[in-house]
Image (tube, rainbow, N blue to C red):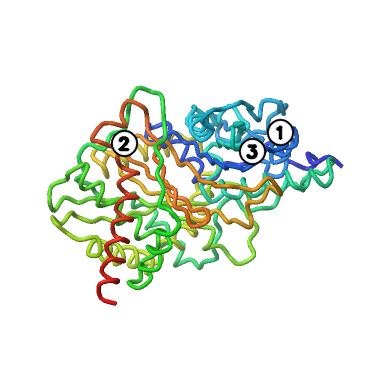
Amino acid sequence: MSANAGIPSVLPVEFTERLVYLLGELGAMRPQLGAVVTFDGILDEPRLRRALRLMLDAEPVLACRFEPDSKPPVWRRLDHIDEGSLLRLAQSSDPAADATSFVAESFDPRQGPQVLGALFRGEGGDTLAIKTAHVAVDGGALKEMLYLLGEAYRSLDVDPNWEPEPNLNGVRSPRAKAGYREWFAALRQSRVVAPPTDWGDTDFVGDGSAAYLSSAVEPMTFRAAAEQGRTVGATVNDIILTAYYRVLWRLLDPAAGDRTPLQVSCELRKHLPEGTKTALSNISSAWSISLSRIEGEAFDATLKRVVESTTAWKRSGAGRAGAIAMPLLTSLTRRQGLGSLRKQMVKGFSDATSGKGYPTLTNIGIIDEGDLDFGGPRIADAWLLGPIGSEVVLTASTYRDRLHLTLGAEAGAIEKHSRSKVVDEVAGEIDDWVNGYEGARRQTS
């Protein structure tokens, strides 16, 4: 039986997918994500191309185009998919740079399919780039796509006729179990877009083309930072937030006492009932913390305030509230077009930000070394690329304890307010903090 058997021609659009599409339409970001995997050898290009095609059967949303003008909007399966167009192959003298340039190229979810790949052949081995529509998937699903692609590639090596079992019953919207009281509380909380902001100009609009900036915190420093963070109850996310805040204060120079919200992505899968089968989708949300700059404040003191803010957010149950509210909002909007939500978002965005945007951190977390497996050649490194924002959008991902920091923006805006320094200086803040702590520890031991 063909892998296409039983795959529906139309899939409903979830509430979060509506949100991401409209954020792109409003100019807040280009809703696309990417991943780069480097190898110390050569991949089998025909097998990789076939594996990429079979992913579209394994996860049906990837083989669809997004139809925003339908009432309601839908994901519609493509009548024909050209396997040859799914993967670009090119020789490269700088594969990593070419890979990020490929991800930065415009991506339209209305055309479909929702994933494209490029394989760049360099002197030291292959570099694989994957690009996908953020409307279709979030960062957590992006990692799952990489794992799935590796699984398909390995399986085809064993059996060239291998076909995946389509994921037809996976949850595409969070469905945390809750009573009526929790439902109403979650819906009330979902109406809060973000606190007001006094941020100055954080506009990242440039000349229309786009690029990524990248930096990294090396494994020895990353492990030392995580260890030191644990002694004060800080997560790696808290440490990145602290470094990010300090760099933004320095580069954007808000007045002392200004309210400075920073938006953070929130993974909702962990709030689903144990054993829930998920599909590739946008099971994510966002929240924010707000800190004001204190002149001359040390890293440890800023970290303390960040930990207090993130701990309070976790204790409030806001993550669980998001996992409860999202499917309710999906139900309420299931039959509607995008017009009503578009009007609400335009007004809410304007009221909350006074026409400005929010700097954002999207920490996609650990790319699991065991799950990311192509069976050979050996994977040398891997990292993820977040949305290209009209504001300062920093993306973090970790592979083998190497913390990658990337920032996507329109070219021509990157030098504005020295923003080309953002990723390097965030990495530098963490490095300086660790080195200062290590030096002090050596002096007292």
| Amino acid type, callout 2 | Ser
Residue drawn 52% across the image and 53% down it: 399
The residue identified by callout 1 is 45
Judge whether 299 appears above or below 158 on screen. Answer: below
Residue placed furthest toward the bottom: 445
Instruction: Please give the label number shown on residue 62.
Output: 3
Sequence-wise first label, 2 or 3: 3
Helix, strand or loop at disc 1?
A: helix
Residue drawn 33% across the image and 52% down it: 192
Classify mark 1: residues with Cα within 10 Å, few (<14), some (14-19) or many (20+): few
C-alpha gap between disc 2 and disc 3: 33 Å
The residue identified by callout 2 is 420
Q: Position of residue 78 (x, y in %)?
A: 68, 30
Residue drawn 54% across the image and 47% down it: 381
C-alpha gap between disc 2 and disc 1: 35 Å
Front: mark 1 or 3: 1
| Amino acid type, callout 1 | Glu
